[in-house]
């Protein structure tokens, strides 16, 4: 607290800031506190904050600073994933507009992002992209293998999947899935540019 500032002024300031915050934790903090039989005063004393501030947080009147939130979570023994799951639930759908789609090139092969990796998905994180391979060209990165799994669908053209020592011919409408740990290369063996939809987990290309 700065000189000349009282708690009411701080709360007013935080109330204004709260309008910009898309998520709240109050209901969960209050529910856990009541289940444990703690009073506002007990929690406030253990957390080293005022009883009024805890009350404001529980009513979602104030968005707590991260250190205050972590302290309250520690005092009440609340799992952080439990606290933040509402934040993830408020963003169940992510849309990538056609004009905002990221794309990268590796040699003459183009990857256009379809689904963006989400760090909050942890081990279930994935990426998806549209793959464009010119006639006679092939992918490179998977030639040494990597962790995870891949799923592909051929939109247009003919391809050859070279997986370890085996060759698989796949055409328009075919799909393929495999462990990415073995060396693998996708080759365009057709007479038109190859278009394919690919899903990779964990993400390999669009990781930033």
Image: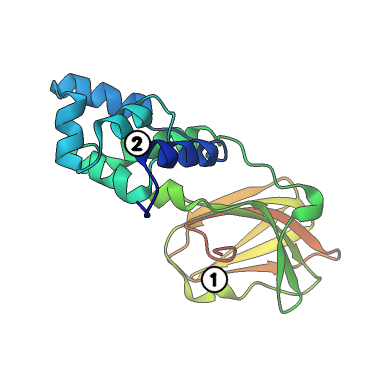
Q: Position of residue 112 (x, y in %)?
A: 72, 59
x and y, in percent, of residue 54 in the image: 29, 32
How crowded pointer 1 is (Cα within 10 Å; few <14, some 14-19, many 20+) is rated as: some
Secondary structure category for the residue under label 1:
helix
The vertical placement of 136 against 4, above or below, is below
Q: Residue at x 53, y 51 (%)?
A: 177
Q: Is residue 61 shown to the viewer in this render?
A: yes
- Find the distance from the CA under tag 1 to the CA under tag 2: 38 Å
Q: Name the residue: 15% across, 37% down.
A: 45
Q: Label 2 belongs to which residue?
A: 83
Q: Nearer the viewer, residue 48 or 104?
A: 48
Q: Are marks 1 and 2 in contact (CB under 8 Å)?
A: no
- The kind of secondary structure element at disc 2 is helix
Q: Earlier in the sequence, mark 1 or mark 2?
A: 2
| Residue linked to disc 1 | 142
Q: Quick one: 67 or 125, which is closer to the camera?
A: 67
Residue 65 percent location from the top left of the image: 38, 47
Quadrant that contains the C terminus: bottom right
Q: Nearer the viewer, residue 50 or 64?
A: 50
Q: Is residue 35 left or right of residue 138?
A: left
In the image, which disc is placed on residue 34?
A: none
- Give coordinates of residue 26: x percent, y percent: 36, 28
């Amino acid at each position: 607290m700065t000189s000349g500032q009282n708690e009411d002024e701080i709360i007013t300031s935080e109330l204004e800031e709260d309008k910009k915050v898309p998520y709240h934790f109050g209901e969960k903090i209050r529910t856990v506190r009541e289940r444990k039989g703690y009073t506002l005063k007990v929690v406030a004393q253990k957390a080293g904050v005022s009883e009024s501030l805890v009350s404001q947080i529980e009513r979602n009147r104030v968005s707590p600073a991260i250190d205050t939130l972590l302290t309250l979570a520690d005092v009440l023994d609340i799992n952080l994933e439990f606290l933040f799951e509402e934040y993830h639930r408020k963003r169940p759908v992510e849309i990538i507009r056609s004009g905002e789609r990221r794309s990268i090139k590796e040699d003459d092969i183009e990857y256009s992002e379809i689904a963006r990796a989400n760090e909050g998905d942890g081990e279930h994180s994935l990426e998806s992209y549209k793959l464009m391979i010119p006639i006679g060209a092939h992918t490179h990165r998977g030639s040494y293998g990597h962790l995870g799994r891949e799923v592909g669908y051929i939109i247009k053209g003919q391809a050859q999947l070279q997986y370890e020592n085996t060759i698989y011919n796949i055409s328009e409408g075919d799909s393929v899935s495999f462990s990415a740990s073995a060396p693998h290369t996708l080759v365009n063996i057709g007479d038109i540019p190859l278009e394919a939809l690919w899903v990779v987990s964990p993400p390999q290309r669009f990781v930033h």
